[in-house]
Structure formats: C-alpha cells, structure tokens
Amino acid sequence: MRRGPLLWAAALLAYAFLYIPLIVVVVFSFNDSKLSAAWVGFTTQWYVALLHNEAMLGAAFNSLVIALLSSAFATLLGTMAGIAMHRYKLRFLPFLVITPVAMPEILLGVSLLLFFIQVLHLTLGMLSIVIAHTTFCVGFVAIVVRARLAGMDESLFEAARDLGATPWQTFRLVTFPLILPAVIAGALMSFTLSLDDFVITFFTAGVGVSTLPLQIYSMVKIAVTPEVNAVSTLLMLMTLSLIIAASRFSPHLFKAKA
C-alpha cells in the first residue's frame, strides 16, 4: 500500500497538534521572565526555585508515595486477576476487572467519593487516594498479564504437573518467571497512571492533601508561570521515562505467539 502525500501531511499535522504544545511548555520553562507571554532570555532559575518551593516538594512527595503504594497493590491484585481470567474463563470476571478501565474518570471519581463517604464513612486523604488509584490501575495490570498468558503454551504447565510439581511450585518456577515481563510492565504503567492522575484524585483527595497534578492545577488557576512550565517539564520527562521503560518489556508479551 502506497503512502501518498495527503497521508503524510495528515500524519504530520496530527503529530504537530500533539507535540508542539509540549515543546512550547519545555521551551518556556527556561524563559527568563515571570510571564510566559514572550521569550526574554535563557535561564534555569525556575528549576532552582522548585527546590525551595515547600508546597511543590510536599505535593511531589505525596504523589510518589501514592504512586508507589497504589502500583504495588494494583500489581499484586492485577496479576492475580489476570491469571484468574485466563484460567477460569468466567464471563463476569473480565467485566468486573475491566470496567474501571473503560469507565469515564469523572464517573469513577464521583462513585468512589460517594462510596468512601456514604458507605465506608472514610475521611478523605492519602488512604482514599491510594484505594482509588489501586481501583483503576488493577484493570491495566490484569489486561497486560492476561495477554502474556494468552500467548503462552499450555503444555508448559501440563509438563510441570506431570513431573510432580504442586500448583504453588508450578506458579513459582514456571508461571511467574514467564509472566514477569508483563508484571513489570503493568507495575510501571500503574505507577505512571497514578502519578499523572488528576480527575479521580480531585474527587478523593479531601482537604489538606495535595498531589503534584493538583498543585499544578492550583497554580495554573492564577497564572501560567515559568515555574509551572518547569514542574510540568519534569513531570513529563518522568512520565516518558517510565513509558519507555515499560515499552521495553512489551515485546515479551507477544514473543510466545511468534
């Protein structure tokens, strides 16, 4: 199939629409002016200023703690859910696991807010955010693990059982090493999603708890300063690094199908 000039032009326009705003944010994070209206000169003072911004450092610490905890819980639960979906073939199980992934974030955020307040009578804070992030990250891990298992040869597990391995030995010595790339990719994906999430965090954070996306939002409401561009650039670099790291494990998901 030949790729005509119109197809290339459409692709370039699409990529330009996606990436030019990101490039502008990065460039103006080095702007030597408190306003982002025009370029004045090059400086790194806004990155230095972030190191002395206690509110921003506190929000970044909260985001890292929440992302680490929620990705750990989501990886554990998502791995078990992915194995269960592959092994038992229950019709309702994929629906229960994947629904939080397909559900609009604002609907999921409102549902979790009502559940925490009216059912659990839970005070909104770090705990509610961790539970909320774990809820929507479990489905992503389960999908990745299930895809890995779907591409594996079932005779490997049958051979382990024929050789006298118990179910736990089969999982520890055969299943888990084979699905480990998928587990790592799911964990990195969960960490990235939790770190960047705004909508669900906005509904479940409560008073006095701020994460990096919430802190950036509160700063943007006043004005888009170079300091906002600087922290957005750092967050963007961290997210891209995690996505690249996760993508290095993705080819292993399809190696068994080759």
Image (spheres, rainbow, N blue to C red):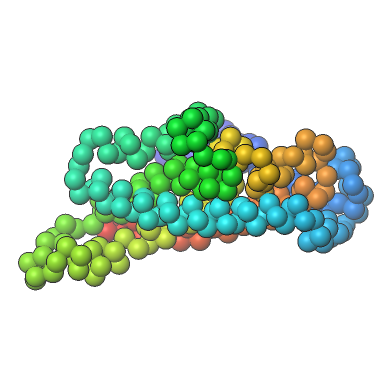
Give how far across and how far down residue 86 sits, in percent.
23, 48
Residue 247 visible, this orientation: no
Identity of the residue drawn at 57% across and 57% down: 65
Q: Quadrant of the rendered structure where residue 49 is? A: bottom right
Q: Is residue 5 above or below residue 177?
A: above
Q: From the viewer's perspective, is 169 left or right of 50?
A: left
Give how far across and how far down residue 30 sits, in percent.
82, 54
Q: Quadrant of the N terminus?
A: top left
Give how far across and how far down residue 217 sits, in percent.
71, 39
Q: Quadrant of the rendered structure where residue 206 is? A: top right
Q: From the viewer's perspective, is 130 left or right of 168?
A: right
Q: Is residue 54 above or below residue 120?
A: below
Give how far across and how far down residue 84 sits, in percent.
25, 48
Q: Quadrant of the rendered structure where residue 159 is? A: bottom left
Q: Nearer the viewer, residue 252 or 131?
A: 131
Residue 182 visible, this orientation: yes
Identity of the residue drawn at 90% across and 47% down: 34
Identity of the residue drawn at 51% across and 61% down: 245
How many labels, in total? Answer: 0
Q: Quadrant of the C terminus?
A: bottom left
Identity of the residue drawn at 53% across and 48% down: 127
Q: Is residue 43 above or below residue 165?
A: above
Q: From the viewer's perspective, is 180 left or right of 109?
A: left
